[in-house]
């Protein structure tokens, strides 16, 4: 599956604090953002479209 980069702006101090506390818990920001994006995808995209995309991706393998 082709990956795409998402860029957004966020308060620098908040981001620094977030990264610091996540590092203490051995959690990666990228992993958490990916989980959140996947949740939004599952919540927003109709199941028949998700099924179609999954089938399409399985054919490419």
Image: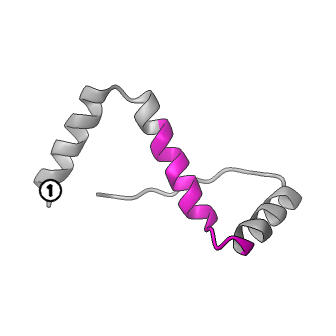
Q: Looking at this rendering, what residue extends furthest in the left direction?
A: 59
Q: Secondary structure at mark 1?
A: helix
Please check the rendered image and state whether residue 27 is part of the magenta-colored stretch, yes or no: yes
- Which quadrant holds residue 38? top left
Residue 8: horizontal and vertical position, in percent? 67, 50
Residue appearing at x 51%, y 54% in the figure: 34
Residue appearing at x 29%, y 57% in the figure: 1
In the picture provided, is 20 more to the left or to the right than 43?
A: right
**Residue tagged 1:** 60
Identify the coloring. one colour
Please check the rendered image and state whether residue 13 is part of the magenta-colored stretch, yes or no: no
Mark 1: give few (<14), some (14-19) or many (20+) Cα within 10 Å: few
How many numbered tags mark residues here? 1
Residue appearing at x 74%, y 51% in the figure: 9
Is 2 above or below relative to 20?
Answer: above
Quarter of the picture holding the C terminus: bottom left
Q: Main secondary structure of the magenta part?
A: helix
In the picture provided, is 24 more to the left or to the right than 27?
A: right
Residue 48: horizontal and vertical position, in percent? 24, 27
Looking at the rendering, the stretch of residues picked out in magenta corresponds to: 24-40
Residue 35: horizontal and vertical position, in percent? 50, 51
In the picture provided, is 26 more to the left or to the right than 52?
A: right
Residue appearing at x 77%, y 61% in the figure: 18
Is 12 above or below relative to 8?
Answer: below
In the picture provided, is 36 more to the left or to the right than 58?
A: right
Q: Looking at this rendering, what residue extends furthest in the right direction?
A: 13
Is 45 above or below relative to 3?
Answer: above
Residue 56: horizontal and vertical position, in percent? 17, 45
């Amino acid at each position: 599956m082709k990956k795409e980069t998402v860029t957004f702006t966020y308060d620098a101090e908040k981001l620094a604090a977030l990264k610091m506390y996540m590092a203490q818990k051995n959690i990666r920001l990228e992993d958490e953002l990916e989980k959140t994006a996947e949740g939004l995808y599952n919540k927003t995209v109709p199941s028949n479209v998700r099924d179609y995309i999954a089938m399409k991706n399985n054919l490419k393998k």
